[in-house]
Amino acid sequence: MGFFSKLVRHKSVEQLQAEVGSRGDFRRVLGLWQLTAIGIGGIIGVGIFVLAGQQAATNAGPAVALSFIIAGLGSACAALCYAEFAGLIPVTGSAYTYGYAVLGEFVAWIIGWDLLLEYALVVAVVAIGWSGYVQVLLNSAGVHLPEWAQQSMSAQTMQYYLQQAFGAHGATAIAAPSDGHRFNVIAAGVSLAVALLLTVRTEWGARFNTAVVTIKVIGVLLVVLVGVFYINTANWHPFIPARIVDATTGLGHFGWQGVLTGASVVFFAVFGYDTLTTAAEEAKHPQRDLPRAVLLSLAIAMVLYIAVSLVLTGITPYSHLGGDASVSDAFESIGLHWLSIIIAIAAVIGVTSVLFAFMLGAARIWFALARDGLLPGWFAKVSPRFGTPARPTIILGLFTALVAGLLPIGEVAELVNIGTLSAFIIICGSIMLLRARRPELQRNFRTPAVWFTAPLGILFSAVLIYGLPWVTYERFVYWMLFGCLIYFGYGIRHSKLAP
């Protein structure tokens, strides 16, 4: 087999469909509403409780609602393509498996390696936001953590320690840190706790997740139903603040470009439905329920996102929304202390479902990569006691705990979106390619107007990638180069499709 042939070798759709009934790695325990709850749990979280306010304050102003709409339209196009694939190939691995079937092994590896990092970083970002709301509750009860344990180091503090460790090398010396923040203990702790929950039986975690999602949706509805009576429309003017550029840093804020930048960042908040497709082999009726759960979870989430962003910027000036607990802060600013506490409780309970969904997705993708031989088979051993991929789950828990404990939320959030946007481009392109190659395949769900929807999804994703900061591209390239070293050093020779 030639070198290029190895890169494009793939499993046929029929082969993957045949494996659906024969695979016995997982137990099929998830119904439609449990799958939808995983999707909603993955979508609604820090996007509402943290990022909506932060992006209003720093990039989009009241037009953060438009940022959500732009991001949501692109996500919806990709969701329709995901839904067709989910009904056609209901196998663990999500976009990785779909890419393996259509584009071949190397592209599939790139997608899987990409999503493995993205999902893990989502867990870290969400854990940091979750920590902010926990501390709101602790402070209201008179409990205060030591300063070193409250937050992670700032970017400047981390640069200071790196400079001290490796030397300035002619660079300007960085001033010693002025605060005592060193490690976000709560964020690290919840990352480990969710990993432990996911090592036990999947149905136990799914029942817990469904209950948590219900509480979260009730909390979001409360924000909208109460907040609408306190909206001051003067806070919406100007809806799109004039563009300004910081003379010191050269960074721009607001204007239409700020709306686009906001859309690129909050895109992190409008995907998550793809995590439920990683649990395909744990669904009772995957070909029927997966497409429905994908579309249902995104539709519910988008309605809630737009409503909350309008209420937040309506009840308080957008410049006041930059904190880690922006929704609670907004209601505190208008004197509704009781509601700010309820919101913090709902956020603390509800955001754990995002951790659950993305940790589950990351572990399943890692498992699928190992099961196909692209990573060592040691990671593809299912726990004989619990029937879960315990090894990758525990390792992911340790990794995300360190990231969430050490890095500030802005540094981590910038890395999240580019990988998922890249995967969306590949999924939308793959669905068109499969329609052209294999029009005769029996599809339980068909992407409507595929020759319009899929290119639109590619366009939206490409535009949002363009709006990301340059440092995101740099770090993404480093991660991809590391992945290529692993594939060409190990995966290409140990693949289950290798002769």
Image (cartoon, rainbow, N blue to C red):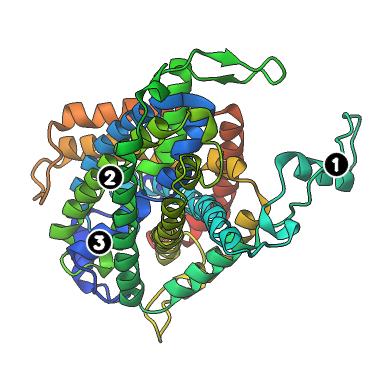
Q: Residue furthest front?
A: 335
Q: Which residue is mark 1?
A: 163
Mark 3 / mark 1, whichever is N-terminal? 3
The crowding category of the residue bearing disc 3, from other C-alpha atoms within 10 Å (few below 14, some 14 to 19, many at least 20), is many
Q: Residue at x 39, y 49 (%)?
A: 105
Decide: is 84 above or below 403: above
Percent position of residue 310, x then y: 34, 32
Circle 2: residue type = Leu
Q: Residue furthest bottom?
A: 385
Q: Nearer the viewer, residue 220 or 275?
A: 220
Q: Secondary structure at mark 3?
A: helix
Q: Nearer the viewer, mark 3 or mark 2?
A: 2
* Left or right: 480 in relation to 76: right
Q: Residue at x 48, y 21 (%)?
A: 258
* Left or right: 177 in relation to 325: right
Q: Nearer the viewer, residue 428 or 492?
A: 428
The answer to whether mark 3 and mark 2 are in CB contact below 8 A is no
Q: Which residue is mark 3?
A: 35
Q: Which residue is mark 2?
A: 225
The crowding category of the residue bearing disc 2, from other C-alpha atoms within 10 Å (few below 14, some 14 to 19, many at least 20), is few
Mark 1 / mark 2, whichever is N-terminal? 1
* Left or right: 204 in relation to 90: right
Circle 1: residue type = Gln
Q: Secondary structure at mark 1?
A: helix
Mark 3 / mark 2, whichever is N-terminal? 3
Give me the C-alpha separation between circle 1 and circle 2. Answer: 50 Å
Circle 3: residue type = Leu
